[in-house]
Every structure is written in structure tokens, then in C-alpha cells.
Amino acid sequence: TVFRIASISKQFIATGILLLVEDGKLALDDRLDKFLEDAPPTWAPLTVRRLLSHTSGLVRESPGYVPILRQPDITVIRAAYPLPLQFTPGEKYQYSNVGYFTLAEIMRRKSGQPWPEFMTERVFKPAQLTATSTTDQPPRGPRATGYAGKDGNWTPVVDALAVRPSGAFQSTVLDLARWDTLLDGDKILKAASRKEMWTPITLNDGKHYGYGLGWTLATKDGRQVIRHGGSQSGFRTEFMRFPKERVTVIVLANSDEAKPAVLAELVAAKFL
């Protein structure tokens, strides 16, 4: 069954950006004014790395995002231009979906094609992720309906028409399981790129924070955990890897009240 995977999508956007780095079309420490010439002066020093790691200082959501309206990503981004940064870039971690809209726009400009097409050609097709696509595409298989409510009183949610780069994709557990195996090899990303993706970000004060490039990084019971959750109206998701033990649990749920991270930990415990 095809589910909206919400912010699990961020690892795929990060993968697309790292492919452009491998292609020599950009660098992780390139400044934003290299890509968006009309960006406000406060945005200009932001780097690709800061956008990927949620350490940019950008607000979480743009006031220009409208779920029922399809519009160019740059329109949503520009709506956030007048808003002040929440903190000095690199000072701390604070989740920002605006940052991932900006990364998608960078991907479009540097690849020379719409970013969903780039992702399909460079990631999904080579990885044989046949059921994975942007949320506005017809599902390749039965699609789950998202539900809101609790105590057995469920109401189907109305799917957003807009594609959010911060939660862009729909997929299946089998596609994501295949993706998980590919993350152990060089078929899509080189080892150096994967290392960048799974290295905790360094803040301005020299301390590290447990987020890499599109992935949350942690330790549980002495074990390394590489994971990411997702949340959209009617859907909750979790992708949890224990790389040294070679155990991965993926949970896709179609309920606002689901707790997929808890389920993933319980299932993982059976194997660990």
C-alpha cells in the first residue's frame, strides 16, 4: 500500500543535493546568494549545509504555503523573505521546512530540470523504487487514506494538492526496505557522501548536534541509531536504522494518533 511518507522525504531531498555535489555543480558550503540572487541580505550567508541540517535560522513554515494551491516553490520561499531569522545561522538546531523548499529550488536550478524529474532519474529509477513518487502523482498500487480523530471516531483527511519538498513523496514499506539496503552500498551515493549525511552537524560553538543532512542521529542503549520520522495530516511515519546491528524498522501509518517511533522501537527490540 502506498502511503504519504511525510518528512522521511527529507533524506531523499538530501540525496539529490549530495548527487549534485558529486557532480561538481555545487558544494555544501556554498552560500545561498550563489543560487537565489534576490534573497534578502540576512539569507545570503546561509549555506547548503545549514539548510540541510536545520541550522539556518529560517522559520519553520512559510506564510505563503497553501495546501490546496499548486504554486512554484520560489513563490513559497519568497513569502518568507520578510521574516527575520530566528537565530544566527549555525547557532543552534531548529526544524525548518522552508529550508527544504529552498533546497528543492536549488536542485531545480542546478540540475536544469524540475526537481521531481531529477529525483526520479537519478534516485528512484536507478534504485528501482517503482512505487515511490511525488504525492501529486497517481499511486502505483493501492493508496492509504489518511485519518484524523481518536477513540474510534475517524474522519478521512483531505489530501493537500500542493507538493511540499519537505514532505514530498509517497512510497511503500517494500520500496523503503529496498532503499535501506542500497544505503549500505555505492549504487546511489558514494561512501563520502553517506558519511557527510550521517555526521552530526557542528554548531558555531564547536559542539555537535544529533542531526546530519536529512537524518536524525542518536544513540539508544549504547547503539547507534540513524532515523527520521514524519508527520502530515492523516499520516505518521518512522524510518529507524541500527546500522552496526543491520536492523531497520520502517513504520507507515495512516492515522494522526499513531506513534510509529514507539512501534519501531518495540519491533527493533525483538531483534536486538
Image (tube, grey):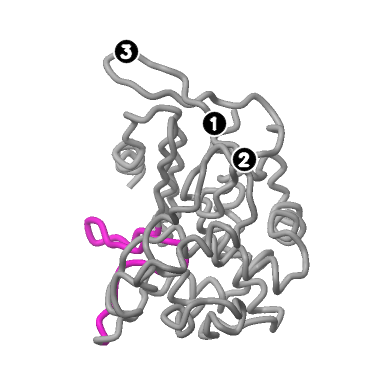
Q: CA distance from mark 3 to mark 2?
A: 27 Å
Residue type at the position of mark 1:
Asp
Magenta run includes residue 53: no
Asked if the residues shown at circle 1 and circle 2 are in contact, with their CB atoms under 8 angstroms apart, the answer is yes
Relative placement, left or right, of 117 versus 155 is: right
Residue 242: x and y in percent read 39, 56
Relative placement, left or right, of 90 versus 2 is: left
Residue 62 appears in the rendering: yes
Quadrant of res 149: top left
What mark, if any, has residue 117 been given in the picture?
Answer: none
What mark, if any, has residue 135 been given in the picture?
Answer: 2
In the displayed structure, 69 sits above or below 220; it is: above
Quadrant of res 90: bottom left
Q: Which residue is depicted at the point 41% across and 37% down? A: 236
* Sequence-earlier tag: 3 or 1: 3
* Sequence-earlier tag: 1 or 2: 2
Quadrant of res 150: top left
Residue tagged by mark 1?
159
